[in-house]
Image: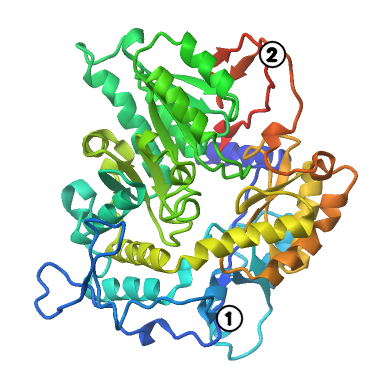
Amino acid sequence: MGDEWDFWLDEALKKLETTKHLRSLRPLLTVPSEGSLPSYAYPPIAIATLDDDDVSPTHLRLPGYGEAETLINHEDEFETFDGLGPWDRSSVVVKISEATFQLWINNRCSTGQETCDFDILLDNVMESRAQPFRKLLLFSGNDYLGLSAHPTVRRAAAKAAQEHGMGPRGSALVCGYTYYHRLLESALADLKKKEDSLLCPTGFAANMAVMTALGSLSSLLSFSGRPTNDEKIAIFSDALNHASIIDGIRLAERQGEAKVFVYRHCDMVHLDQLLSCCKLKKKVVVTDSLFSMDGDFAPMVELADLRKKHGFLLVIDDAHGTLVCGENGGGVAEQFNVESDIDICVGTLSKAVGCQGGFIASSQKWKQLIQSRGRSFIFSTALSVPAVASAHAALLVAHEEKWRKEAVWKRVKEFSIATGLQFLSPIIPLVIGDEEKALQASKHLLESGFHVSAIRPPTVPAKSCRLRITLSAAHTAADVKALATSVAPWICSPNSVVKSNELSISSSSRLGSTQGPKYCEDQAGVVVGQGSKSLPLRPLGNSSKL
């Protein structure tokens, strides 16, 4: 039996290698900033616990954060700054070993095993002697505000770890939910202008929990416990939604609780047609607010108008918009002034917040349903106390240091000017088209000192391979200018999709059109919708293989 499994595994890996879908781990070494202190040198942040009689912190209520009072000594420990500090560079500067570098530029698979001499790693960290490491400028992360390295965020995590370790280890419904979790949930609810929020281990888990909880509603309302076709939930999903949404929908469908319709990317005419033809009463529309691979925004105003027309529940995944968009960092819905039209907002703490975890902002009633029926929430260990404490500190820092949000949008403008293209967000997809050319472009940037990954199928559709560049407040104008110079050959190439269309905003709006009526397959090719008018048919990513 063992030999058979070895054979099957080998054959599966060969197929992945042949189709170029074998993925790699590339170990990075973060670079301590010049002048930064080791973790033990940071004075502890004064965070009060329920039974801490020795700490008398200043209770600080920040505007817009309502119930979320911060229990910190603001004058001594809560530091904010008027501009970039030396610590900010550690969020965008990394090192890789020479071995990792060689595997990467030769496009060879790695599981990270090439960097396993921890004595060498330690020596490199301590800079006791020169080691074969290359320094890279990171343009592929999601730390949009550079908060992951902020001194106040570090102190909050360190203090929580020193006082509580990792905290109670259990699911939130058993013993993993602490006062720290409640404090962060309140702050997130205020940020999103919702009654409440629910923390999840990851953004992926948050989307899964929402979709499965929505599906469960049809079973709960069915007399038999198994909904008939007419009792199912109708879920309408954008064709380029994140894999976590897709998997959550797929699970709800597999449970026999939902019927799924996928509309063409950001195509509100197609969505309107599907909604009009659907006879099911319970309708849900779910979409990314800012799409992670295309850098374009969902048509929020049009979605709000359709919500009024059809009465559906509107769910958005604001993973890339939280703290980045909107006057107060409330996200894409705030930016387009449609916050009251959003019923459920999913977000993450691992992007602009710079920490770890996910959350769901909603009414208290929806929170009750999700925490009772969302499987990925119920059966997961709650976030650790240090992760929660650091995320809460990051929200407070973002509120005070508004220049960070302004800085990232300034970088977007600078990159647009430097490349001669117009970009809509800090997510910049330079669509190369051909997979080999995308890999060559990534290799060129790597050799030039930039960490920019080539994005290939199945993450994006075939012939739309791209360089996915992300900008951060921790980048400087000089960083952006240098990157623009390095990518110029691919922007100016006569075969480049970028040049031929002049605007690298969304691959889905670029590649061809077909006259209707046409069927629109969902990501698994299962559910279709039919349009009756001549509509642009945008290529769909086969995200089912993610």
Residue situated in front as seen by the camera: 37 or 81? 81
Marks 2 and 1 sit apart, C-alpha to C-alpha, by 62 Å
User: Badge 1: few (under 14), some or many (20 or more) residues near its Cα, within 10 Å?
Assistant: some
Q: Is residue 283 left or right of residue 273?
A: left
Which residue is depicted at the point 32% across and 63% down?
392
Q: Reply above or below: 54 against 373.
A: below
User: Badge 2: few (under 14), some or many (20 or more) residues near its Cα, within 10 Å?
Assistant: few
Marked residue nearer the N-terminal end (2 or 1): 1
Which residue is depicted at the point 37% across and 87% down?
41
Which residue is depicted at the point 70% across and 65% down?
480
Q: Identify the disc placed on residue 36.
A: none
Q: Secondary structure at mark 2?
A: loop
Q: Secondary structure at mark 1?
A: helix
Q: Is residue 438 left or right of residue 207?
A: right
Q: Position of residue 271 (x, y in %)?
A: 53, 20
Q: Is residue 202 left or right of residue 7?
A: left
Furthest residue toward bottom? 128
Q: Which residue is mark 2?
A: 534
Q: Quadrant of the C terminus?
A: top right
Q: Which residue is mark 1?
A: 120
Residue situated in front as seen by the camera: 4 or 185? 185
Quarter holding residue 407? bottom right
Q: Position of residue 147 (x, y in %)?
A: 46, 67
Give, as a three-letter code, the residue at label 1.
Ile
Q: Position of residue 16 (x, y in %)?
A: 66, 40
